[in-house]
Image: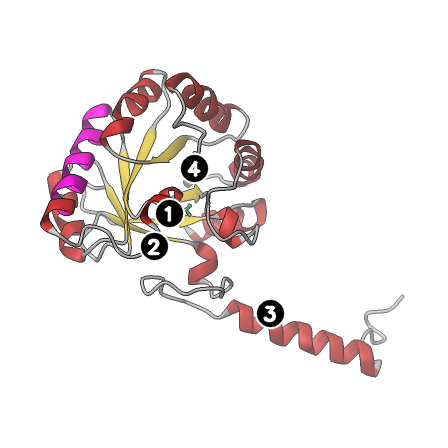
Amino acid sequence: MKAARERIAALTAYDHLFAALLDQAGVDVILVGDSVATVLQGRDTTVPVTMDQMVYHCEMVGRAVQRAMVIGDMPFLSYQISTEDALRNAGRLLKEGLAEAVKLEGGAPFAPTVQRLVDAGIPVMGHLGLTPQSIHQFGTYRPRGRDEQEQQRILDDARCLQEAGAFALVLEKVPAELGARVARALEIPVIGIGAGPHTDGQILVTHDMLGLFTRFRPRFARRYVELAQTIGQAVDGYCRDVRDGSFPDERESY
Ligand code: KIV
């Protein structure tokens, strides 16, 4: 798609119902993100989500999808301890979780891990810029790559991941100009999230773009609908109907 200059549309899903809806609507890539921790589990960060939980969510998504590419996120400490560990855990996302590829956060220090997984037949997507698993190291979710030195490091990391065999890269919350630079510099597709309009594709957290997740609202997350409000109105209507006796009516009764 990059070679044909077609932009790639990616979204997250964590369960069978949403994955089927996204797939039927024509999304190209479905990421079972470790954002499941903040979006569905009500955690403050993505750090606590476990390998078993990622396999559980991946499998539901994998079974639902006919068309899109399914990528499973490697959770914190599932690939940082050793390459063997990374291989075993990435393998679980493919074997048990039915994913077709895995994603991991980090640059040059993880190039040997990426290479090992790719050598074993596991496609790997990198993730640079804001890397939420490192939140306790950075202390903030502010944009990354704001000075030339950090931009150069991100660019070097991106080249290093490509060299190691990564098939694509997520680039999160960096200046649009850096998004364009990285996409230009790489042959593999760069999928941006808060990385401006010049990357080879975009990814959003589905629950953000549907207006379902309202705990915080990243500036880059365009909302296409306000489902939290719609659900609130529907539940309010149901409660009213139950309480005033208008639900169920004759047609809804046996
Ligand atoms: O976990 C996730 O959902 C992600 C995307 C935001 C890229 O990593």
The residue pinned by badge 2 equals 140
Q: Which mark is residue 135?
A: 1
Along the line of sight, which residue is nearer the eye, 69 or 66? 69
Name the secondary structure under disc 4.
strand
Along the line of sight, which residue is nearer the eye, 130 or 235? 130
- Cα gap from disc 1 to disc 4, whole angstroms: 17 Å
Q: Looking at the picture, how far across and down is residue 129, in whole percent?
A: 26, 46
**Labels 2 and 3 touching (C-beta < 8 A):** no
- Cα gap from disc 2 to disc 1, whole angstroms: 6 Å
- Cα gap from disc 4 to disc 3, whole angstroms: 29 Å
Name the secondary structure under disc 3.
helix
Dot 4 crowding, Cα within 10 Å, few <14, some 14–19, many 20+: many
Mark closest to the chain's N terminus, 2 or 3: 2
**Labels 4 and 2 touching (C-beta < 8 A):** no
Image quadrant holding the C terminus, namely: bottom right
Q: Three-letter amino acid code at disc 1?
A: Ile
